[in-house]
Amino acid sequence: MTGSSRKGRIFLDEGSIHGRKFGKLKKEKDEFDGYNSDNNPRKSNLVRLDTPHLDPHMAPDNSPSLSPLSKSPWSSHINEESSTSSHEALVGSLVREEGHIYSLAANKDLLYTGSDSKNIRVWKNQKEFAGFKSNSGLVKAIVIAGEKILTGHQDGRIRVWKVSSKNEQQHKRVATLPTLRNYIKCSIKPSNYVEVRRHRQVLWIKHYDAISCLSLTEDHSLIYSASWDKTFKVWRTSNFKCLESVTAHDDAVNALVVGFDGLVFTGSADGSVKIWRREMQGKGTKHFFSQTLLKQECAVTSLVINGEGTFLYCGSSDGMVNYWVRDTNLDHGGILRGHKLAILCLATAGTLVFSGSADMGICVWKRSALNNEHAFISILSGHTGPVKCLAAEKDQEAMLNEKRWILYSGSLDKSVKVWKVSENAAISHGGHNNQPPRHSVDSFPRELPRVTSLRKMGSRRY
């Protein structure tokens, strides 16, 4: 990660550098890419992009030789005003002309970014390192499973990628879920078809609406996918077989996290957070409904569990963050108030909690180890569009006695910003720069007003 140790370099402002356009992209051979609208297998066509003005939706899926790296529309900027003494500093900005940023995943020194251009970019030290393409469906979710990269898409499919053993800058798609083998085998039995909206029938192993998020068990043996089709599905990582489909909510499932003690948490546009208990049955799984943690009028938009697995946080379209404490049998801990519009994403790092919102700000909270209360630290401002995704990792350049984190924020302003945030930061007492008071925790329950997000985000689906 590029840090403040670099001296003598001068970086221009964000708006003064023009992104570079795509050059020629070539796909050497056809590859199977899931199914068309009639559920038939298809092959992606050979497409050449000889001009930067071609529609990016025409871009083919990835092959080992295909990479958008050579002439990227991204440009990397370092904030020359950042200081090592600052507890919160904007240290870099990755600006693109491709599309809105919908997903992020940080893995050691690499950052994966997904957008509605269907490209997945890989960044190293705030410079583009690699890139690969999906044939269809904007990239709504990215998770790292060991050597594999999983991406969830608007078209309801999960794509699995693997880094080439010969060249770490090349990524090859190794599977599309559901797999062709699983799909054909399942389609033989009429009982495997379920009725969905408008009396349409689809196989139970296939999401018929956008995938909203992906999650993994701690040992990476199971993959969970949640969708706007009101279900979540469970996949075995070893062979990518769909093991189970659960109709979880009355509306779109916006968030899912795999938690502790075999529990799975889901959040929905129907305003509820539910707990599911996983049991292994032979070679499959069975999930049983356990309880409803939250039921409210406004949509649940995001869920996250801290690294120690002791707190569950829930963001909603009313701009509030609810949290529950594991040590007290998931009793409600309180509500964090800091945003004017919908919460779109959450992340945790150490004792810090980050909330990104449609109001374009990122609130930073610090959890007390003594009483589990959360204190407001600051608002990170810099985006000019809703903050759609967050990812955090430990700052390797921090001093031994300093707990400092690198926070990545992706926005619908088509940029990714890089922040350094320290757990040693002073707690704000409010009253300045439109910041909330020190203890933004209210009693529960209470009626919360619904705040409508931007129309582009949809009314209740995120």
Image (cartoon, grey):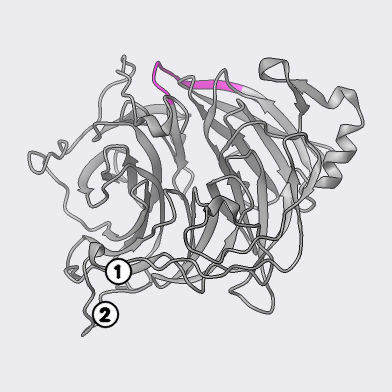
Q: Position of residue 16 (x, y in %)?
A: 23, 66
Q: Is residue 449 above or below residue 55?
A: above
Rendered residue at 73%/20% (across/down): 200
Rendered residue at 47%/42% (across/down): 305
Residue at the limit of the structure toward the bottom, as seen here:
8
Span colored in magenta: 290-299
Q: Is residue 296 magenta?
A: yes
Asked whether residue 32 appears in the rendered view, the answer is yes
- The main secondary structure of the magenta stretch is strand
Q: Position of residue 65 (x, y in %)?
A: 66, 72
Q: CA distance from mark 2 to mark 1?
A: 15 Å
Q: Is residue 15 magenta?
A: no
Please tell me which residue lies in front, 208 or 436.
Answer: 208
Amino acid on which the number 1 mark rests in the picture: His
Of the 4 image quadrants, the one containing the N terminus is bottom left
Residue under numbered circle 1: 77
Please tell me which residue lies in front, 360 or 403.
Answer: 360
Q: Nearer the viewer, mark 2 or mark 1?
A: 1
Asked whether residue 323 appears in the rendered view, the answer is no
How many numbered circles does the render carry?
2
Q: Give SS at disc 2.
A: loop
Rendered residue at 25%/25% (across/down): 442
Rendered residue at 52%/20% (across/down): 292
Q: Is residue 435 above or below residue 229?
A: below
Amino acid on which the number 2 mark rests in the picture: Ser
Tag 2 and tag 1, C-beta contact below 8 Å? no
Residue under numbered circle 2: 5
The part of the image, by quadrant, that contains residue 5 is bottom left
